[in-house]
Image (spheres, rainbow, N blue to C red):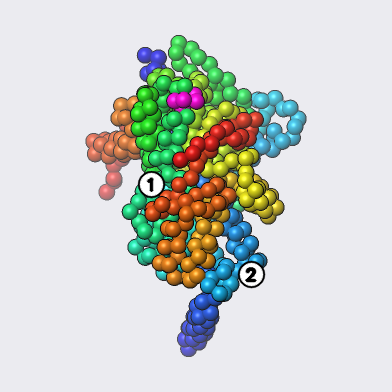
Amino acid sequence: MALSLQYLLNALQLGSVYALIALGYTMVYGILTMINFAHGDIFMVGAYLAMAAVLFLLGLNLDLPVLVVFMGSLVFTMTLTATLGVTIERLAYRPLRNAPRVSAVITALGVGLFLENFTLATIGPEPRQVPAIIPVQQFSWAGISFTNIQLLIIAMSIVIMFLLDWLVRHTLAGMAMRAISYNRPIVPLMGVPVNRMISLTFAIGSAIAGAGGLLYGMAYPVIDPYMGIRIGWWAFIAAVVGGIGNIRGAMLGGYVLGAVEIFTPVFLASSTYRDCVAFSLLLILLIFKPTGILGRPTFEKV
Amino acid sequence: MKKSGWLLIIGLGWLVLALIGFGCGAKSEEEVRLGINAELTGSKPTVGDSCKKAAELLALEINQAGGLKVGDKNIPIKLIIEDNEDKAESAAAVAQKLISQNNVLAILGPNASGNAIPAARICEDSGVIMISPWSTNPKTTEGKKFIFRACFIDDFQGQVMAKFARQELQAKTAAVLYDVASEYNKGIAEFFKRFFEADGGTVVAFASYTTGDKDFSSQLTTIKAADPDVLFLPNYYNEVPLQVKQARNQGLTCAIIGSDSWGSQDLLNLGGPDLEGAFFSTHYAPDIATPKAQKFIKEFEAKYGKKPDDVAALTYDAGLLLCNAITQAGSLDRTKVRDALAQVQEFEGVTGKMAFKGTGDPVKSAVILQVKDGQFKYFASVQP
């Protein structure tokens, strides 16, 4: 029993990271019906920015309180990744807004490669360590071991997800986003600034990926320029499994994928089957419920 | 009309370049061309960097002394350094390129077994000598005539660590966590298991992951439930720190041991205090260096401002072995150099004495190091 709970807790931690990144995929898809394959690499840049911020703040030797260092790094990382997301959208995706959808997808892959190789060239290929912001404390309760970092990640992710869900459902900006996602050609006629709303979507999605990068760097403090590739793919599957375009679906998908990764080695003796299980899940879902768990079917109007 | 003018200029440009290229090809008789097939980018760039630096140091030393003695001439060495991106397919492509385009006499590297095995196949088929400094998986040289290595093999290393765990650490049970997608990790994990069980121990958990994974919590939970006396992590230096950190966070308190893939300064930079007290087997210990090794360590430090790791030492030895064999053969004929190399009876390198007995694998000893006060400290030597 304690063992299953331990696995479940591990799955929650990993799933939280996948969920945060899946949100970015799903938001961009929801508004532009485009898959932003550079998103995993924005997450990677976020982890590097977080490392830089933490190094800087700890390097000041001011004995800053832990909360200040954490919040400072979080704000810095989220601001810069948001700027990066908006810049990428403005320079790479907006000129292709009316081009065939495949052009935008290929551009996104190119932007991802650019970010990876730019990091590789400027910072170097060697893995880096993210210094610990919060000293790790290990707790043991009823046979389950967990750390303060683990709890922080799970809690932070849930807070971010609730904030986003509230923003999309209960604010004017959120309403505009939903409207664009519903019918892009008509919305400008209602006076909604479509370009600004799309920029905002990219900003929010990328900022969340940046926060994900910081949290990830705290849990797995060795980062490298290729780290965004696999996590990006898994988060993408998470978004599709949950129902791409649907925010609550992306969160659910993230936790499902976290559970797949943690429970595969438990039942199948080798973690090597992990990707087989994840992609099989994706295929089965696409056959029987192509819109994902929470996605609503779309109708082509003729 | 204007367009065709440009085409003409571009065409002429290519012609000139081709002529220059031809000119270079013609005078290249006068150098010993050695290829370096190293992991300069990818997941273990420190390995490639050490390999490149040690090879450059050796080439510089020989060229400053007037060149390598071949017959009655002294010929300078020219290194052609290529990046295999730490990918099996790139390692093979680099070997192919070094052979067909650069017409090298011999290739040093790749270092990681996963890259060395495919590259070895290509060198063997083309009859080009390849010496891997660091690849310990038996498959690299198995059944091949032109492939050599400068390090011991994993049968030996697995045995050394199994014995160490049983006798020195008094472990009755062991757990292994290894990368199933990498030949090196998988090979040594299996040898460890075989020898540990033959020695009367029990392997209570034999868990795997895939290259690039960052989350090992699932496997470590299973391992913790099996409650082993010792945890064996035969994985590369960039992954071990996360594994050790997560193991400790899960509340695993047992002794942790590893293999020669740990021997990089980066392990300490990334792992910090979590690694304190861990043991691993490797090729040489700087703190008990022979005069020959001390000279190398001093020169390497003077040139690059850091201590050479095991890959650097082994690359230097591999290069020195090759140069000695070329001088011995007195010719730049690949088959003659290969025969001279296979007959090396005793060679004293930076990493100790080695001898070849008919195969590409040298007979040499291993050392066990411990992480102590944030440094690698010599613990014991194990003879073959």
Residue A167 located left or right of residue B156: right
Q: In which quarter of the image is the N terminus of chain A?
A: top left
Residue A195 can be seen, yes or no: no
Residue A287 can be seen, yes or no: yes
Q: How far across and down, in percent of the image, does residue A301 sit? A: 29, 46
Question: Identity of the amino acid at label 2?
Answer: Gly
- Residue highlighted by disc 1: B138
Q: How far across and down, in percent of the image, does residue B383 sit? A: 49, 39
Dot 1: element: helix
Query: Which residue appears at 76% of the width and 30% of the height?
Result: A62
Q: How far across and down, in percent of the image, does residue A183 sit? A: 39, 43
Classed neighbour count for the residue bearing mark 1: other residues with Cα under 10 Å, few (<14), some (14–19), many (≥20): many
The extreme front residue here reads B345
Q: Which of marks 2 and 1 is nearer the N terminus?
A: 2
The extreme left residue here reads A288
Q: Which chain carries label 1?
A: B
Q: How far across and down, in percent of the image, does residue A76 sit? A: 63, 37
Which residues are the magenta region? B165-169
Q: Is residue B294 above or below residue B191?
A: below
Query: Which residue appears at 58% of the width and 49% of the height?
Result: B350
Q: Is residue B155 magenta?
A: no
Splitting the image into 4 quarters, where does residue A58 fall? top right
Question: Identity of the amino acid at label 1?
Answer: Pro
Query: Which residue appears at 53% of the width and 31% of the height?
Result: B279
Which residue is nearer to you in this view: B255 or B345?
B345
Q: Do the residues labelled 2 and 1 touch (CB within 8 Å)?
A: no
Numbered badge on residue B66: 2
Dot 2: element: loop
